[in-house]
């Protein structure tokens, strides 16, 4: 706090202010500040946008394949392998072509997009999920995924969608309000001297 | 890859379908392996028969080596190489 006050005084007092910084550095600082402000205001939009883009791409791939546009569909399909195992037996098909994401991941990213949109539309005022409810909503996917991974049982598409949706909703509902709260607490006070 | 029937070579059945991206990837892997290992390849489009289509539509690409080793879905190159090594070991 004392350091902050000292900085404010040095900026407002021309006799104690530091020597002018080079123009390039000032420009860099200005753009960094703008970028920082942009992220501060639009972080939720960006994350939701990326999730939405993943879902949209996954849905678009079978249509592109159906239309014979494999030149586009194939690289998109392969790039989605970065976020999904794309196991054919665990995936949905449209017009006979596999979607870019498996059923579980499709429901995770769709529900995350949906929850992100709700968060944005409520002007980031959505109350956060209590941690115990968050954990509770993650348990079904852990049980479904792990028991299947260890070959104890086979899941169904209904369970993959249900557990994936709960997982996606819970994460956004818990994490987004938490991020917003942290950012609000960490944001510097807007005083005339700093503007 | 050999086109002539040779009982000594591993017999590979490859079930595929046009427009299947994973199948294209698996086909490239088979080509890579063919550069080093000889095998007899039979490629079948599952749409050629209703029975095959029903059996493999949600599983392709499916590679069956010597009627016993089955690899399907998202096939990893390492996994495929191991299957070929296993097939060779069995033949000895």
Image (cartoon, helix red, strand yellow):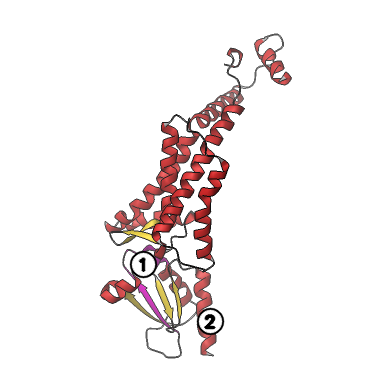
Image quarter (top left, top right, bottom left or bottom right) of the C terminus of chain A: top right
Position of residue B50 measured from the top left corner of the image (x, y, whole percent): 26, 74
Q: Which residues are magenta?
A: B9-25
Element on which disc 2 rests: helix
Q: Are marks 1 and 2 on the same chain?
A: yes
Element on which disc 1 rests: loop
Side (left or right) of A89 relative to A36: left
Q: Tag on residue B86?
A: 2
The quarter of the displayed image where residue B21 is located: bottom left
Please give the count of numbered marks on the rendered protein: 2
**Residue A49 visible in this rendered orientation of the protein:** no
Disc with the residue nearer the chain's start (1 vs 2):
1
Q: Is residue B14 magenta?
A: yes
Instruction: For marks 1 and 2, give the one nearer the viewer.
Output: 1
Position of residue A19 measured from the top left corner of the image (x, y, whole percent): 69, 16
Residue A180 versus residue A134: which sits nearer the camera?
A134
Q: Residue at x 53, y 70 (%)?
A: B78
Q: Residue at x 35, y 55 (%)?
A: A73
Residue for badge 1: B58
Q: Is residue B31 magenta?
A: no
Position of residue A66 measured from the top left corner of the image (x, y, whole percent): 28, 58
Side (left or right) of B35 relative to A93: right
Label 1 Cα neighbours within 10 Å, binned few <14 / some 14-19 / many ≥20: many
Above or below, comparing residue A28 to residue A77 in the picture: above
Marks 1/2: CA distance?
26 Å
Q: Tag on residue B8?
A: none
Label 2 Cα neighbours within 10 Å, binned few <14 / some 14-19 / many ≥20: few
């Amino acid at each position: 706090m004392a350091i902050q006050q000292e900085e404010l005084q040095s900026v407002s007092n021309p006799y104690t202010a530091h020597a002018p910084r080079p123009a390039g550095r000032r420009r860099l600082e200005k753009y960094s500040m703008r970028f920082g402000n942009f992220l501060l205001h639009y972080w939720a939009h960006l994350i939701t946008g990326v999730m939405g883009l993943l879902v949209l791409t996954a849905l678009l791939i079978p249509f592109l394949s159906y239309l014979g546009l494999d030149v586009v569909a194939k690289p998109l399909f392969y790039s989605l392998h970065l976020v999904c195992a794309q196991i054919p037996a665990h995936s949905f098909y449209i017009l006979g072509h596999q979607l870019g994401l498996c059923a579980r991941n499709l429901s995770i990213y769709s529900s995350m997009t949906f929850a992100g949109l709700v968060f944005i539309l409520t002007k980031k005022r959505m109350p956060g999920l209590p941690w115990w409810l968050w954990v509770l909503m993650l348990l079904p996917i852990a049980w479904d995924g792990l028991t299947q991974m260890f070959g104890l049982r086979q899941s169904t598409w209904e369970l993959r969608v249900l557990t994936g949706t709960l997982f996606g909703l819970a994460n956004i509902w818990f994490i987004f309000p938490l991020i917003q709260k942290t950012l609000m607490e960490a944001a510097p006070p807007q005083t005339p001297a700093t503007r | 890859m050999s086109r002539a029937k040779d009982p000594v070579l591993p017999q590979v059945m490859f079930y595929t379908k046009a427009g299947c991206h994973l199948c294209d990837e698996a086909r490239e892997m088979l080509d890579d392996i063919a550069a080093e290992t000889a095998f007899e390849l039979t490629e079948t489009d599952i749409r050629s028969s209703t029975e095959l289509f029903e059996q493999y539509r949600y599983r392709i690409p499916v590679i069956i080596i010597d009627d016993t080793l089955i690899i399907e879905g998202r096939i990893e190159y390492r996994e495929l190489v191991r299957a070929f090594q296993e097939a060779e070991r069995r033949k000895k």
